[in-house]
Image: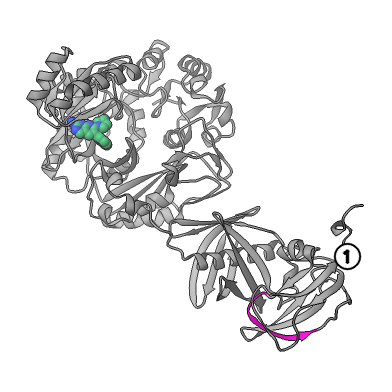
Amino acid sequence: MFSKILIANRGEIACRIIQTAHRMGIRCVAVYSDADANAHHVAMADEAFHIGPAPSSESYLRGEKIIEVAKQSGAQAIHPGYGFLSENTDFAEACEANNLVFIGPPSSAIAAMGSKSAAKAIMEKAGVPLVPGYHGDDQSPETLRAEAEKCGFPLLLKAVAGGGGKGMRVVENIGEFDDALAAARREAKNAFGNPDMLIERYLTQPRHVEIQVFCDQSGKGVYLAERDCSVQRRHQKVLEEAPAPGLSEETRKAMGEAAVKAAQAINYVGAGTVEFLYDVDGSFFFMEMNTRLQVEHPVTEMVTGQDLVEWQLKVAWGEPLPLEQSQVKTRGHALEARIYAEDPDQDFLPATGNLRYLNTPDESAHVRVDTGVIEGDDISIHYDPMIAKLIVWDETRDQAINRMVQALEHYRIAGVKTNIRFLHALADSQPFREADLTTGFIDSHRELLFPKSKLDIHKALVLAAGFVLEERKSTEVISTDPWSPFGRRNSWRLNSEYAQPLQLQVGDDIHELKILERDDNYQVFVNGSVYGLTVKLDDDYLQAVINGHRISIHGNLHNDRLVLFYEGDTFQCTLYRENYVSEDMAADGGLNAPMNGAIVAVQARVGDAVTAGQTLVIMEAMKMEHAIKAPADGVVSGIFFSEGEQVSEGAELIAIEVADENTEEAG
Ligand code: MV4
């Protein structure tokens, strides 16, 4: 077996490969760009080489540089992961030329799948089912038009050089054909430098079902079940699962055998994936072959109990496949969700930022997290914004979905926008639970996937208040001057019956809360409602009881930004003003009623000099007394109510001229 390999990749897949290699006793060499000097994959590796600036083109795509450091390090093989150089024939050849084993297929097999029409010709010869259509060399408009009529409508024009959904065009009838062809050719020429087209019957409700195949160097091949990756967005996979729901044993076997034939037709070696379009009637058609280990390989690992990276290393070393076809068994159901730094509310715009708070679900036999980042890391503009893959397993699909929903609730991130809420809604949706899977799933269920917040705004604000108050208590600085409202962050707490105002900004709305504290219970006044609240904050874990409803949530308060996590959803707000009383009320000398109530006592007269913290007015509301105290030293300049009067929330009770030079106008 290899004793040292180089991993020509970054992020979660580099970490994933290092993990298995280390378990097998293999040393690992990492490579890194400027942006990744402190990355997790570098820390995990036994040694690492800097290969250039942040942009991929100047670092992770520099084949010669990577080969140079591989030789320098004494590595015997290079694992390319996925993306970057993994399907680059020149790189695979350069490895071979430099006596380095490329942990992947021979470059000829990569090349064979580079052209869609050539791939189809190979698959046709090998007896792999193809979507009816035309993939010939004659690209004259007359021939294509005649082939289109033979094929029937609707049909799909696909760029021969395309991939991943680029350069495709649906044509509904022959009248549209000439214009559509001209446009598709122009697009393909611009995008790929090759205007050639193939024609296929257009399947309107297909599923994406792919087979994991493995071949060893002796030409033996096996399939390791299938994955359903129908839930995609703009040709990006979102949720993947194994096995494919509803696939019959006969179809699974036929598809698996077709996939192995496909791989053997191109003398494949190592891990590969044969993608099929699976139609409602149970028929399936070859779509593409991916000549790499795929992002979603963990769902296959979970149901087969095999480590595909270990298989890759063994096969690359020249060992036979670890299992015969008859020994490949699957058990239960696995799901994978791709957690991305992106904003579903802004058309999934990639997001960047610092992962200032990051909690991953506990890993177990049921939950696996493949990630390359830790709390405090940045998600930069330079690379794919995938934060992690969350993989779950259970005996049945239904149970696996429950696991996924729960694990997503335990995946908490603050600092970077993510798709977690979207994934949660998706996994928990009725159509997904019913396995109503087609490639149009996301587009046809938009209303379910962007749900309204589950947390009532008032309750959310009350929880936010509880979090802020408790967090301040835990970090409070004891002032040497107990009467100074400015000497401590939460001066109001001394005045146990003073109503503490708290302004929370949610979006563009500013919510004014008033909070009373007595004996560790709070009363929170929000928009005319009052909530009894008790809270206990343990680091980021808030246990709250609101009017007898116990809610336990997590949160993160960072400077003035608070994020609460609730059932896969987040509630975000900003502390609008740190100290409403001292900065606002004191400045204009007004003291207002914190709620509707009655004046019990007025303990000052106009003209009195008062000191900060001195009780001026006592109010009664909700059967509790509340002292209204001077926020600062000053002179009482007005009293607007007398004992026994009813006042409404916000009414100005008393005015003070604050003894503060800063409030006087300069000359
Ligand atoms: C198709 C198809 C329907 N009919 N071919 C999209 C990506 C590319 N690899 C092939 N794709 C498709 N080919 C025929 N004849 C529908 C798609 C397709 C699709 C396939 C798999 C997963 C998601 C998809 C989303 C839109 C379209």
Residue furthest right as drawn: 667
Q: Nearer the viewer, residue 92 or 118?
A: 118
> Is residue 406 within the magenta segment?
no
Seen in the picture, residue 186 relative to 469 is either above or below; the reply is above
Residue furthest bottom as drawn: 644
> Is residue 597 within the magenta segment?
yes
**Res. 397 in view:** no
Q: Secondary structure at mark 1?
A: loop
Q: Residue at x 15, y 30 (%)?
A: 258
Q: Which residue is mark 1?
A: 659
Q: Nearer the viewer, residue 641 or 620?
A: 641
Q: Quadrant of residue 230?
A: top left
Q: How is the image coloured?
A: one colour
Seen in the picture, residue 165 relative to 568 is either above or below; the reply is above
Residue furthest front as drawn: 667
Q: Quadrant of residue 203?
A: top left
Estimate the x, y position of residue 85 in percent, counting from the top left. Answer: 41, 22
Q: Nearer the viewer, residue 467 or 178?
A: 178
Estimate the x, y position of residue 567 in percent, counting from the top left. Answer: 43, 60
Q: Residue at x 59, y 30 (%)?
A: 37
Give the number of marks.
Answer: 1
**Relative to 271, is 12 on the left or the right?**
right
**Relative to 494, is 186 on the left or the right?**
left
Q: Where is ligand 1, by quadrant?
A: top left
Q: Residue at x 9, y 19 (%)?
A: 146
SS majority, magenta:
strand
Estimate the x, y position of residue 509 in percent, counting from the top left. Answer: 56, 58
Q: Quadrant of residue 663?
A: bottom right
Provide the residue span drawn in magenta.
594-602
Seen in the picture, residue 599 relative to 252 is either above or below; the reply is below
Q: How many other residues sit within 10 Å of disc 1, few (<14), some (14-19) or many (≥20)?
A: some
